[in-house]
Every structure is written in C-alpha cells, then in structure tokens.
Image: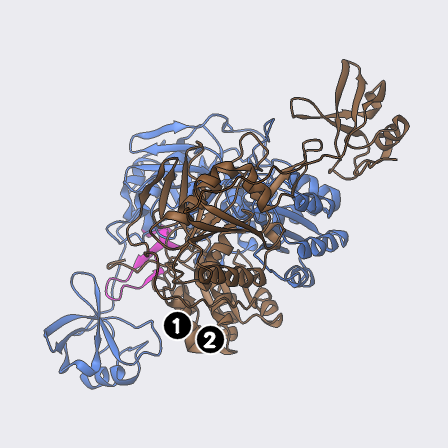
Chain colours: A blue, B brown
C-alpha cells in the first residue's frame, strides 16, 4: 500500500480500492468525461470528499468522489531522483565568495509530481544549477542551516555573524547568505549590527519563487549577489532582490532599511525612507549610492544577541497587560510599534513607565512604516518621553527589534543601552534635518 | 508666580529671578547679541540647562543658561482668547450633513504662544473657520468625544456606529466623522462592518497638520468630506485625506482598505491592494471607482463590538508565551500578523492550535501589508491550516482586528464566527483569481 497522506473518508476508500498511491497517474471518470493526472497529497485536512489530481498543465483539479463513476491507476509513480551534475570548474584568479545556505525558497526545489515546495537543495546543487556563477567567482558553498526563515532566531544570527567574521579572516572577497524571504529583513538588520564595519560586501539573497518555477527569480538574484559580493568596491550588509517585475535588474538594499512589503511579488522588498544602495543589471552595477563604505578597514565583529527583547504592535484598546506579560516573561527591552508619530494609549504609557523604572529599555517606532517618530508634537508623545520611552526616529520596527537584541547582547544596560540604541551604528536612522 | 512647567535646575532659577512665566516675552543677552521671544514650556524633562524662546519667525531657539549674560521680561503674556464668529447661515435646500467631532488634529488648535497642540476647538468653531461649508451643505456639528485617537476603543466605535445609524433615521444625507489620524484606519474599518449597507456616505476625515498651521490640510479635507457626504451618489464608509502633497486633490479610500503609511506627510493614507474609491477636486468628484454601492437600500446596523480580540505581530524568536498571555487575558479572537504568506514559527503554531482547540478564533494576516496570505504553498502554512488558523486573504491586519472585535461582538462563535470572519462583509478582501 502506497502513501495516501492527507486523504480520508470516501476519497481514501476509493483510492484504496483502486490500489492508488500519491504520485501515481490516475484516470478518473467524471460525468463530463475522463480526467487524467498525478495524485497529489491533500493539505486541507479533514475533507474526505475530494481527491486532487495535478494535470499536465501544472494546475491541480479537485474532484468530488461521490460524483465519480470510477478511478483507475494508469501508471505507477516513481520516486523522483535528482543527481546533480558535477559542478563546473571556476576560472582561477576570480574573486572568492562564500555562499552560506540557510534554507528558504532560494534553496528550495519543488516536487513536480505533488507541487509541494520544501527546502531540499544543497548549495552545491544550487551552484551546479546556476553555471553562470563559474564565470563570476570561485564560490564556496556551505550549508549552515536548512530551515524555513520563520524559524530563524537570534541564535542563528549569532552563528551567521561568526561565520561571516571567520570568512573575512579566511580572505574571502565577499559573502552571500541565501535566506528565506519571510524574515530576511530581520536577519539583514541583525547582521548589519553584528558586523558593523565589515570590510567586504555581505549580501543576503532570497527568492520569491522557488527555483524550479518558470518565473523563478532565484538564479538572477543569486548571480547579482555573488557578482557584487565578489567585485563591488563597497562593503557592508545588503539585501539583493528583484527591482520591479521585469527580470533584468536587481536592487541592493541597505541591511537596516529593507522590508518585505508584499507577500508574493518578486520585487516585494523595498528600501524605506532611503534610496537604494545600488542597482545591478546584467552587465554589472548600474547605480551605486553615494556614501557607501569602501572595502577594507579595521573590523571588530560583535556577534552576540540576547533574545530577551519583544516587538509589540499597539492597537486600539490594547490591554496594559500585554506590556506586563512581556516583562514577566523576562523581556529586558521592548520595541513598541505605536501609531502615527509614535503614540500609545494613556494606560500603556503608565505601564511603559513602570517597565523603564524597573530597568527596562523601552523604545518607540511607528506602525506607519514610512516617516519618523516624533514625541515632541503632542502631549501623548511628551508623556512617553517623560515615561522614559526612547523615540527611534525613522528606524524600522523590525530593525529596531534586531538592534535591541544586539544592544542587550553587548551587555549594555541603563544609560549605555539607551545611548547605543540611539546611536547610528549601521545606517539605521537618518539624522533629523532642521526644521523637521 | 507664573507657570514655569518643564523647567528645572539653573534655567528655573534664572527664570524665577527674572520674574518670568511661560507666555511672557523675554529678552536674553547672549554672547552674540540679544534674542527676544516668547517663553515656551519645556518637554525634554530633566534638562535644567536651557530655556526655550519662540521667535517671531515661529521657530524655537534653545539657549544655554550658563552662557547668558542676563534675562529680562519685556512683556507679560496674556491668556489667549478665542471667540468664534457667529456661524454663517447655510442656504436652504442644501443637503444636510452631520459632522461628528471626536478630537484629533482636525479638531485641534495650536497655542501660538507655546507651540503646543491640543484638541481644543469645537466642531462649531470648525464650521465657522471653514465658511466654504455654508455653500455646500447644512452642517450640523456635534461633539461626541474630545480625545486623541490613540485613546479610542471599541466602545467608542459602538457609540459612533449608533450615532450614524440614528442620523440615517433622522434623514441626514450624509455623515462626516472628524477623527485623529493615528487610529483613523482602525475606526474606518470598524464602522464599515458595523454600518455595512449604510444607505448614505459616511466619511471619516482627519488632518496631518493642525488647522492653524499654514500648511494645514484640515480645511480642504473637511470641505471634500462634507461635499461628498452630502452629494455623492454612492454610499458606504470612506476615508478622505490629501492625495499627493499638492493642495488640490482629496483621495477617498474604502474604509476597510486604508492605512496610515507615513508618520507625517499630508498624503500619509494609502489604499492597499485596491484602487482609490474616488478622487475629489475643487470642482467636485473627478473620479469614482466602479462597483461602489448606490445610495439607499435596506440597512440593519450591527454596532456591537467585543474588545476581547488581540493583534499580535510575529517576530523571530517570539515566545509562545505571547499567545498564552493573550489567552489568559481573556482573548476570544487573535489576529496574527505573520511573515510573508502568513507564517509563524513551529512553536507558535502549536500554541495557536491549543488556542483554537479551546474555542478561540485565530486568524492570519501578513506583516508585508501588500499582497495576500496563502497557507497552501509551504508546509508551515499547511500546518497552520491544520491547527485551525483562518487565513484572511488580502485583509489588512488593522481591518482584521476591527472585524474580529465585530464578529465576536455579534455573538458569533465557532464555525459561525469563522464563516463571518471569512465572508466579504464590507469589501475587506478581494476574491482570489485563478490561477492565483
């Protein structure tokens, strides 16, 4: 008996009767004719009425079992096999780039038969699949994790930062980190702080489409990332993702200023409140922003993070207990995503004052995303300043969380932690202009 | 002795010696000459070194007390007085529009002397200040609350919805709600559900600049709101705010699709994932989207909200305790703002499963803001569906929170609550197209 996972009820019964298993090609007799396709697993648990076939067109069709006149197996499925070709040999004299794999879409391969996507491919396979890389750099793929990015934690940030710092010592010309896009912005911010002053380009790269889909962005994103990591004259932490929906330009965003702003578009990532750091086209860098740090220079990584910080988005009627709960759970720092210029209700302001009084670091960002927190305009803001809440200017909430975990990870507390949190460590804020 | 609030240390001492009070015009002798200005209160608590004068130019200047050769009072300040002119008499036969005041910037007046902004003006004063209104509608101003919008709660939403429903019965042609911009999006969504099917236009309006500043947007926003509320041929709940930074077009956003996306720009509000509902120019409506409901029709308000819902933004390493704390605090519904297509970490998925098992309504939106939640692409999403988490398609997180409070406010629970939460009640989601 083959695998029939996800099926139940009448559907399971009829599939068992037909001797079918997931991956088999089935022919189903429907009232309007025969439908042939590959049986795929169900994910809508608990529905026992339908079976799902993947048609040759690539689309799935759900068929109600009670309406079928019969189901038969046309061909048994085979376990999919994949043997990577031998990696092409890179030319000597090319820059050396470390590619760190962490999981995520850029390291995913779709199972054609079932349509399921999972992190399955190794970085070496990736390298084979994108032979253009061999003309750009001597790439050294290395898998550190194989997890979806929503499961990345500050512990992973620390390990990544340490590995990049080691790569700098090993003489790599640049580092690429392949990362799931979900939390790519958080990790980019975290590495920006841990690796402030890094003398080579560190480029985080992801893909919004898995590498086996025709519309995949993973190859071009990776090519641009490796090219810039190996050859750009600037250093620092960046995110490389599609610019626009066309397939010929890659945007490089500053690691502390980037946000995934769309669930699915290939150009989902945007730089907030600052221009792009650079734009790459098929013939190389087409635009480089002024003021990026040059390669080289002294570098002291500070790769420690302390996860005891929380990001809390304010909403109307949020109970003060939400702050108390974070405090009881051991939070040493809070990033509050307030409304507008950085506001919360009166009740919460009181609770934040208590948190600060007990030694906590409370900071304010805005859920507006764009623009700058300003606690000097309204009474509410002034009350927050009086409560000891630190306004974070135009810092993104996600960046602020990573920074708070980094600040307390350095061992700083009290006035020193406030000072470090306010300082512009890695381009995370823009100086206020006068009059603002 | 006059008010010297906010001052301390040497600054307070020297002001006391000079017999000065806030609002007095002072002359300070500085090393580079004399500076004359009005003494304003300090808000940067704890700094005793500076006094702040507002110059005739409107800018404030901070002067270090230790560097001054002397301070003297040039003129005593007077309490500011404001007597509103008698409201102009509206022409007969014009549409009748109820203007509800709630506080916030559109109902604020700056204290010129100190630069402080507070909700101080009544709607009647507003009416007098914007005489153009008398040519557009017979306006009936009514103050319901006078609070900053960050202090608005579901209880206020209920009262507003009931008042609007009553206005419909009273025969008003339209209703305008003047509201602080911080939580304007939340209230607009809430009223959209409570007043689904409302037969007249209900227009929420705010201002990003207080009405006494030269760059104020409050007059034009209000004129557009009253004009559309009184005369538009469509009905429903909308938000009226500046379109672009120029001062001649007002955007009308659907109440369930609008978000404050910038902390301070006059065009801070954007429609997310849908086109604008309408655009108003100085000569009337210039564009109206297809598919808006016409005026009239049957209408049954459902103005009850139950505040026992929480909005929780996921972040890397968020402890599962954050969900448990909400549950212990009595939350009946959770809106989780996941990453990407709607993902959270494995630990949180387990906790959400427990919440659903205990009868809670758990829903998923995306912190990407743009795009659509899809839990069918990755294992993480399918695990969430299996845990009973309801994906909310392209619904905004803020709209989802207001909707959840409304759904449980109707008394719905279990399958009925899930059904209502998934249904498109007030244009809050767009049907998925195939292939998506």
Q: Range of the magenta residues?
A: A104-125
Q: Which residue is mark 2?
A: B412
Q: Position of residue B166 (x, y in %)?
A: 49, 62
Furthest toward the front, the residue is: B92
Which residue is at the front of the view, A306 or B118? B118
Q: Is residue A119 magenta?
A: yes
Marks 2 and 1 share the same chain: yes
Residue B248 visible within the image = yes
Q: Chain of mark 1?
A: B
Label 2 sits on a secondary structure element that is loop
Q: Chain of mark 2?
A: B
Q: Is residue A412 left or right of residue B277?
A: right
Residue A365 numbered mark, or none: none
Residue sitting at 66 percent across and 59 percent down? A323
Label 1 sits on a secondary structure element that is helix
Which residue is at the front of the view, A338 or B175? B175
Q: Quadrant of residue A5?
A: bottom left
Q: Which residue is mark 1?
A: B419
Q: Quadrant of residue A17?
A: bottom left
Q: Position of residue A149 (x, y in %)?
A: 45, 55
The vertical placement of A267 against A66, above or below, is: above
């Amino acid at each position: 008996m083959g695998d029939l996972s996800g099926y139940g009820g009448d559907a399971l019964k009829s599939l068992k009767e037909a001797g079918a298993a997931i991956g088999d090609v089935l022919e189903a007799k429907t009232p309007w004719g025969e439908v042939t396709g590959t049986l795929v697993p169900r994910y809508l648990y608990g529905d026992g009425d339908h079976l799902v076939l993947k048609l040759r067109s690539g689309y799935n069709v759900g068929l109600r079992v009670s309406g079928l006149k019969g189901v038969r197996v046309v061909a048994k499925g085979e376990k999919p096999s994949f043997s990577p070709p031998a990696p092409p040999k890179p030319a000597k004299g090319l820059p050396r780039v470390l590619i760190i794999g962490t999981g995520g879409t850029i390291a995913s391969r779709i199972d054609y038969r079932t349509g399921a996507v999972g992190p399955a491919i190794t970085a070496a396979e990736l390298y084979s699949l994108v032979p253009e890389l061999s003309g750009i750099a001597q790439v050294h793929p290395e898998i550190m994790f194989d997890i979806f990015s929503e499961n990345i934690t500050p512990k992973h940030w620390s390990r990544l930062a340490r590995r990049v710092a080691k790569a700098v010592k090993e003489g790599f010309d640049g580092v690429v980190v392949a990362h799931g896009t979900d939390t790519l912005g958080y990790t980019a911010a975290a590495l920006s702080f841990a690796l402030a002053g890094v003398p080579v380009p560190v480029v985080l790269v992801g893909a919004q489409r898995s590498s086996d889909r025709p519309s995949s962005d993973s190859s071009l994103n990776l090519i641009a990332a490796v090219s810039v990591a190996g050859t750009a004259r600037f250093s620092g932490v960046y995110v490389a993702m599609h610019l626009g929906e066309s397939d010929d330009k890659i945007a490089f965003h500053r690691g502390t200023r980037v946000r995934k702003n769309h669930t699915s578009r290939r150009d989902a990532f945007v730089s907030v409140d600052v221009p792009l750091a650079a734009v790459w086209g098929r013939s190389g860098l087409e635009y480089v922003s002024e003021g990026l740090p040059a390669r080289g220079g002294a570098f002291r990584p500070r790769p420690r993070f302390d996860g005891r910080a929380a990001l809390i988005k304010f909403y109307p009627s949020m109970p003060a207990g939400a702050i108390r709960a974070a405090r009881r759970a051991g939070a040493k720092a809070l990033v509050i995503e307030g409304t507008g210029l950085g506001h919360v209700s009166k009740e919460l302001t009181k609770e934040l004052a208590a948190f600060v009084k007990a030694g906590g670091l409370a900071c304010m960002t805005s859920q507006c995303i764009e623009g700058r927190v300003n606690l000097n305009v309204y009474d509410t803001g002034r009350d927050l300043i009086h409560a000891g809440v630190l306004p974070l200017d135009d810092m993104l909430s996600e960046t602020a969380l990573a920074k708070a975990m980094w600040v307390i990870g350095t061992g700083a507390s009290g006035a020193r932690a406030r000072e470090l949190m306010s300082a512009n460590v890695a381009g995370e804020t823009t100086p206020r202009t006068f009059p603002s």
